[in-house]
Amino acid sequence: MPIFYFAMPGFYILAVYILAAVLPAWFLLRYIYRHDTVEKEPAGLLASLLLMGVAAALCSGVLEGLGEAVLYRLADPGSPLYTVLLAFFVVALVEEGTKFLFLRARTWRNPNFNYRFDGIVYAVFVSLGFAAFENIQYVLHYGLSVALPRALFAVPGHMSFAVFMGLFYGRAKLYEAWGDRRRCRWSLMRAYVTSVLLHGFYDACAMRGTGGAMAVFLVFVVFMFRSAFKHVKQESFTDEPV
């Protein structure tokens, strides 16, 4: 009997784990793609942005490890201050920073970046490439028990951070086309800072883990998710060339 016959159950289990990790990102990617109604982006560009997200996740893993090592020497790991600093100045700053750098390097001068809504599409594809890769790691390490909560919170969270990043990123491209360098730079800064603040607050509440922090977390994510989806619809409907 062929050896691979005995390996098949393990293969199917692995496939189930990976599907559980990837499907939430796929559904959200499809949602964003469908709202790009004026001019669809090339499949090759979108695939490369997903890979940029994976690259951002790999870079973030290294940089966050260095950041945690430094922070461990500066603050008591059991203190609320440590949690806040870790959430904002290590995790959020690094993860949104690597996403933003790969996003801009791949798309800012790309000729396909010719509509304002493209900024949201590009940012979300990078972010969900990051989230899907991160989700695979979590599910393979902790099992299917983490798949549902991450599908409900972590993956939509990454998408929401990216929607606000892309919102200002697209406006920055528009201002550049108008020759308004000051507003272009300001919008690029807002793209990064807004995503960092949202990500940092999300993580600070989740990491704190107290009853009060989790209540604030749930209210926050409901409003953030609703706002992100509202912006997607609005920006899609009012899209304009840049």
Image (spheres, rainbow, N blue to C red):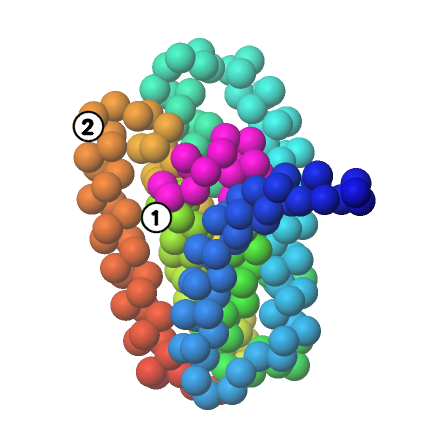
Q: Is residue 31 above or below residue 137?
A: below
Name the residue at 34% across, 83% down.
238
Question: Would residue 146 appear left or right of 80 to someone viewing this image?
Answer: right
Closest to the observer, 233 or 155 = 155
Above or below for 109 versus 143: below
Q: Which mark is residue 160?
A: none
Helix, strand, or loop for circle 1? Answer: helix
Mark 2 Cα-neighbour bin, 10 Å: few <14, some 14–19, many ≥20: few
Choose between 78 and 35: the one closer to the eye: 35
Is residue 143 highlighted in magenta?
A: yes
Q: Which residue occupies 19% across, 28% down?
A: 212
Q: Nearer the viewer, mark 2 or mark 1?
A: 1
> Could you tell me which residue is drawn at 67 percent across and 50 percent down?
55
**In terms of secondary structure, where does tag 2 sit?**
helix
Image mark count: 2
Residue that badge 1 annotates: 152
Q: Is residue 191 visible?
A: no
- At which x and y percent is residue 87? 43, 32
- Image position, residue 136 (x, y; %): 56, 43
The quarter in which the N terminus is drawn is top right
Spatial separation of the CA atoms under disc 2 and disc 1: 20 Å
Magenta span covers which residues? 134-149
* Residue 215, percent from left and from top: 19, 35
Type of amino acid at the residue the image marks with label 1: Leu
Q: Residue 201 location in percent, x, y? A: 34, 39
Residue on which disc 2 sits: 212
Q: Amino acid at mark 2?
A: Gly
Residue 209 placement, left or right of 60: left
Q: 173 and 148: which one is in front?
A: 148
Viewer-side residue, 213 vs 135: 135
Rendered residue at 24%/51% (across/down):
222
> Is the stretch drawn in magenta largely helix, strand or loop?
helix
